[in-house]
Amino acid sequence: MSSEQPEGFPPVNDDRRKTIFVVGLGMVGIAFIEKMLNLDEPKRYRVVTCGEEIHLAYNRVALTDYFQHRSVEKLYLNQVDWYARQDPERFLFYTGEQVTSLDTDTHCLTTNKGRVVKYDYCVLATGSESTLPSYIPPARAEKTQGTFVYRNISDLDKILAYSQKDHVKGGRAVVVGGGLLGLEAAKAVFDLESLGDVAIINRQAFPLSRQLDDEGGEIVLRRIEAMGVQVLTRTTVVDITTSPEGVLTGLVLSNDQHLDAKMVIFAIGITPRDDLARKSGLKCQDKGGIVVDDSLKTTADDVYAIGECASWKGNTYGLIAPGVEMADILSFNFTQVVTGVGGFKPRQMNMPDLSTKLKLMGVDVASFGDYFADKRIPRGVAKTPTSKVGVAAAEPLPRDKGDRRPKAGEPIWEIERDETPRVTIKIEPTVSSETATNGEKSGHRRAASDGPIECLTYRDPFAFVYKKYIFTADGKYLLGGMMVGDTSDYVKLVSLVKKKKTLEEPPSKFIIGSGGKGEEDGADLDDDTQICSCHNVTKGDIVASVQSGTETLADLKAKTKAGTGCGGCMPLVTSIFKAEMKKAGHAVSSNLCPHFAMTRQELFTIIKIRKLKTFADVIASAGVKRDSVGCETCKPVVGSILSSLYNELVMAPVHHANQDTNDRYLANIQRNGTFSVVPRVAGGEITPDKLIVLGQVAKKYNLYTKITGGQRIDLFGAQKQDLPDIWEELVAAGFESGHAYGKALRTVKSCVGTTWCRYGIGDSVGMAIYLEERYKGIRSPHKLKGGVSGCVRECAEAQSKDFGLIATDKGWNIFLAGNGGTTPRHATLFAKDVPPSKVVRILDRFLMYYIRSADKLMRTARWVEQFEGGIERLKKILLDDELGLCAELEKEMDELVGTYADEWKAVIKDPARKRQFRQFVNTDERRPQIEAIKERGQQRPADWPKQFPPAKLHPSAIGTPKSEWKWRKLATVHDLTPSDAATTSAAVKYGDSQLAIFHIPNRGYYATQQMCPHKRAFVLDHGIVGDDLNGNLYVSCPLHKRNFRLSDGECLNDAEYSIIAFDIKQEGDDLFVLLPEAEELDTVIGTSKWMVKQASAEVASRGGGKAIEIVGVGVGAPDGDAAVSGCAGGGGGSCGGGNPLLDW
């Protein structure tokens, strides 16, 4: 990461604390100070400020409220105790003190109290002052009683005091100016009981002419007049009249009319306070305002200006939002351009959003976006017949009239009532003065000045409501608008404009309204909709199963096979199942499994509170039966919870048996029983030397290589016994585990961002690497993926990730809970413009809360969808800290990331653990599981057929009677490393056959064939050993979770399969298995007999294989004819259901 700092800001490695002096303690000044204190986590700065008012920073926008409560403390933006809590080494403030001189050469300021402060950087936030008309120069204003401005607390105190004078009581107060400030002042004096009448003088035809058009202004005018306030329009004041004593008596208007008045408040505008800057030699605009560049820097070194005093590109802004935006930009650049989590392009001033929403004179008023776009472009409209229906559907112009330019004043539609005054909805096209073309590219927003627009207007004089929305001519984009009376959609509409988002509904719906969407429970799916593509299970099959009495998901899966293939359909299967159960009046259990009568979240809480450290402790403390072994559902869940809390090595004997195969062997098991190795490539950044090592390792071990979607390199086909050696070479080259095998963080994908891209704004690579390094190894309910894009072009696809960041010119936008898969979900915008230094804490909270509360195998997308209150509730919890959990979640994450250790390195350093990776514990011989074929220059396993024939194997299929079998030593106790705390297993080779041996604490040893007949995979020793509540022990195949009872080989969740179980005994340190001769056993379960080959798979895919049941003569086949079932008992011939090409 680059440590360079842009010109004008201190280098990050400068240890000396810099002083920033803020001139002005107003709303913008305090906003900058707060942001600096918040963002300056390394404490590189000391902020000093002084304000000339005696008050602390207060809300100037809420001045009118002061007339009601008369308490300035209620307007304080931060209460007194906030100031008292600040570290004086970081923040000093002075009130009632004004900076009188600024020496930019010596970097010194002097105040009116003689205080001299040396600064490193100076920020001018002096604001503005109310403008007085030319006929009232300052000297005259000082002498005249009854003339006021409306700007600060002092002004309001003067107004209040003067309104109580005897000669003023009951008299008229006049407000000059009909803009935002004028209406605020009018409302304030209107509420004073001491005054009689209130009048507003506005030189325009209607008030709020800078926010509303004439039609909107008229609605406001009528509402104000209905309150009893006199509004004089199209006139101005040319002078005031006073008594000989200098007391105001009235106003002289431009029409020579004299208006009696006891008090006048001038609200005709504001003037930037740039006097200090001018004295100091800073460049200022002739009309007022300190000139600043895009970084808000003035013409003097190390001096900046923000707020109403700053003039950017010749513009000054009297609204608070642009000032706060400037404070945000400047504080960001001081603190975030170079940080410990990557650099960031300095932010620059852009055209501010001038959208406003206020309540003026009791009227809600709002304007947003380009709300005067229609005023800049000549209008043209055409008349069509008036409809007498309430609100009718809009129809386009006929083709023969679509090309002519409508005449001025003709409405395209006018949908009206017969009564007068009327309620109207108009669509008015506005076409640019240049000929409009049809060449606009799809999906790109066109600015109003680039093409035709249309206005949708709504006017209801009865309710004092007016709305005008401006759209592109095709109705795809909202450009801006204004509202009077009803501003309830303001936030939504502003968001649409800012995001430049294509509208999903026709423009008329923004006034008429639209219905909501239902939940994703499959209610809108037809019964013949395929839900599980692996087993062609339809929604109707699931519905029928529930209606026939199925009450658990496990039973549903067993009966319909839904979710027993790839499992990707399970979220929708679960939703449909729950919906149908609810319809049938059944309660749906949310218990984890039969062993734990509680949810994952409840179990997480118990384990955490009781500080349980092993599965044995957990089952004893919270299980239904204390001596249960567990199952393929609860063991990985408990293992994940323990890792999420304590992050102990999953290879440790006490935890090893809880892991699914991938975690058990720290690599992803593939369909041929080999594994894939995925080293971590944080952020997708890798050196040439490391690339070379990956290539060398792949060639040495004959591995198939592929670039993953997460910007890593996957090495496929690794033999289990080779894994430690492969890891050792990778670790020596600087790699570590990529945790592709775990329900953990996989990758944080990134674009190149500011590292290379000419469009880059944020250091996406640096941020991605930091996040991946921080969260690596953390176990969670499901896998986690992240993405970081350095600009809004979104090359890293961050919005499809569990967490994603997109750089804007203000910081990072955080998106949460996106994912692909069966039911893709676009991530939701969670927080906008987050400074880089704040991103990590928000993600800490989100991930830790997800780990705490999500259900088993639930992605963040489903978690957020099912979270009560949804994303908005999560914002309150994780951003607003409504539950007071944020500090706790951050602390837990800090503790968790601090426990990280590379699991690959832990294995290669421990000879005992390396021994667990042997293919067979009784021989070093290797045996391939599936025929290998070559494709595109690389080796891969032969294809599986589209569907394997079901297969049931029985001991009776072996020619020699069991009474003649012999005890044969195949392993030692040491080979299985038995433990009282967890199950262990190993594979052994006997002839061409493979067997699996299991040790279960307090239950002894068990042996079965190694092959799972479902997919002909030799993997059962990798499976999780569990039991049901009746004590039946079984092994769960790691590929597709077929559960085979250890005592007799019966499949407990699929009657179409069974395996052969064998007797086993221990004598001293040796383990003996009761077996026939190797040649006889090979004819039934030999590896060569069952290994998938390309030719036989193709035959099976064409329907050449039937169900196979391998039994002895007279057992399981009618009339002793084994050909019906597919294989004769002890023969060594074909076993393919009558097809000799199927060598099973």
Image: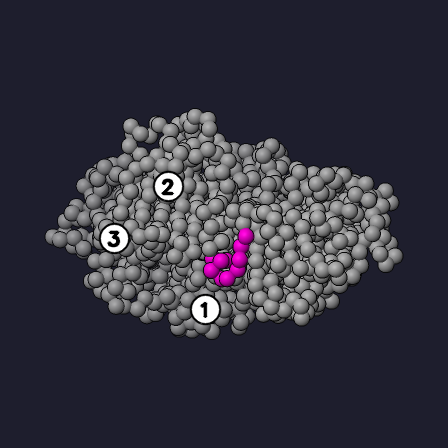
Query: Which percent across, then down, holds residue 954?
Result: 26, 55
User: What range of the chain is rendered magenta?
Assistant: 223-232
**Which residue carries the number 2 mark?**
427
Q: Which amino acid does label 2 sit on?
A: Ile
Q: Is residue 1051 magenta?
A: no
The residue lying at 71 percent from left, 43 percent from top is 289
- Relative to 132, residue 868 above or below: below
Q: What residue type is labelled 1?
A: Glu
The residue lying at 26 percent from left, 61 percent from top is 580
**Which residue carries the number 1 mark?**
602
- Name the N-terminal-most of marks 3 and 1: 3
Mark 2 touching mark 3, by CB under 8 A? no
Query: Which percent across, then down, holds residue 47?
Result: 76, 55
- Name the N-terminal-most of marks 2 and 3: 2
Q: Which of 7 and 365 is in front in this view?
A: 365
Q: Which amino acid does label 3 sit on?
A: Lys
